[in-house]
Amino acid sequence: MRMMRPTATGWLLVLPLLAFIVVTFVGPITLMLTRSAYDPELAELMPRTRSALTGWNGIGLPPAAAFESVGADLQTAAEGGTMSRLALRLNREQPGLGALIERTSASLQSTPATRLLDLDQRWGAPELWRMLARQTRPFTATHYLNALDYRFAADGRIESQDQSRRIYLDLLARTLGVAASVTILCALLGYPLAHAMARSGPRLRLVLLFVVMLPFWTSLLVRATAWIVLLQRKGVLNETLVAAGLLADNQRLELIYNLTGTIIVMVHVLLPFFVLPVYSVMSGLSGAYARASASLGARPFYTFWRVYLPLTYPGIASGGVLVFVLSLGYYVTPALVGGRTGQLISNQIAFHMQKSLNWGLAAALGSILLAIVVLIALMLPRLAKRGGLRT
């Protein structure tokens, strides 16, 4: 059969969708990847310094022109009203450097001809100049190093962050652990439910499908608030257990504003995303395989393990990957019910975007999550192909 080539009219019909995908998906992702490695802020704020340090080999102190260039850039920043922005940006790279920049700028305004070394002896530190030479380059690996709890040392080597600042690898490990836990719990709870939906009669199936779809029609904020009412120390669950004598009043369960609360609410929210793919696979399976296995003398568990489960494996893989990927980027639920110990990497990304304004670090953290998602997406076809009867 001859394949039909798309016509001009067909391309025009697809064009709005392509434009929507580019504007809302491809564009933001490209901007995030670019922002994670391209940071021209210091290069724009200190153009003379960047030019003066371009050919410097990093040994000893830079030439006198570099000192003059820093003074000229500081005066320009003070006149242009960008001094606070410059001080904040440099202080992010080295604590205390912002105060040095502001003090030096104020001194240069009163006595323009003063040498930097006469104003503050810290300008005689080669480490400071190596940092300026590195950070005034538009392309940098600093954000990715920070996202992995590393940094550039004073001599330019890569070293681990101080113990008090190593938070991102732990948050990433916690995020992956929560995503795996939520996926496993969704599989344990959702697989029997999907099987019941696929094997029940039309009326019961409709009721079960309504129960599964009901969370999609309820606001996430409402659901999270309902779980807070149920799980808090004075909530319905703890009050019931205390009233029944199963718990003493001082032994109430801590089920909210921690990692436990985050997992419980995420399982409730994401369970339909596992049930529906598995149900779609189960509803298309023929019962002939199970009947043939039973007629050959196989016990029910053996039939399930060697016949039924392998046939439903594509649905399990699709639902599991969908739940895992959605769990990686969850933000609202940990923010509402996670407390201090239930925060995930997405909460740190939001913090740097909204409060610290370190968009480069936020972009680097987001790029790492994107790399994990892409890796899982590349593995999905191989996982789905493993379905079928086992020999």
Image (cartoon, rainbow, N blue to C red):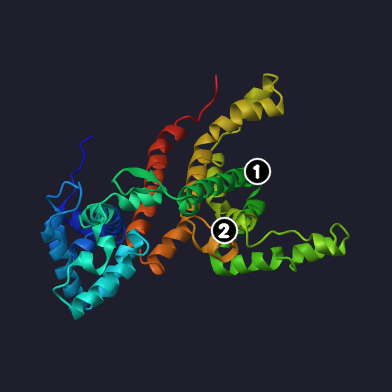
Q: Which residue is found at the position 21% from the left and 77% from the top?
A: 78
335 with respect to 116 (left or right): right
Disc 2 secondary structure class: helix
Three-letter code, disc 1 = Pro
303 with respect to 366 (left or right): right
- Residue 90 quadrant: bottom left
The answer to whether residue 36 is visible is yes
75 with respect to 252 (left or right): left
Three-letter code, disc 2 = Met
- In the rendered image, the quadrant that contains the N terminus is top left
**Disc on the earlier residue, 1 or 2:** 1
Task: Give the image location of residue 199, x and y in percent.
Answer: 64, 42
**How far apart are the two marked residues, 1 and 2, measured between alpha carbons?**
16 Å
Task: Give the image location of residue 33, x and y in percent.
Answer: 29, 53
The front one of 20 and 205 is 20
Task: Give the image location of residue 83, x and y in percent.
Answer: 25, 74
Q: Which mark is residue 213?
A: 2
- In the rendered image, the quadrant that contains the C terminus is top right
Proximity of marks 1 and 2: CB atoms separated by less than 8 Å: no
Task: Give the image location of residue 183, x and y in percent.
Answer: 56, 45
Q: Which residue is found at the position 56% from the left and 40% from the top?
A: 282
Circle 2 packing at 10 Å, graded few (<14), some (14-19), many (20+), is: some
Q: Which residue is found at the position 18% from the left and 44% from the top?
A: 5
- Residue 30 quadrant: bottom left
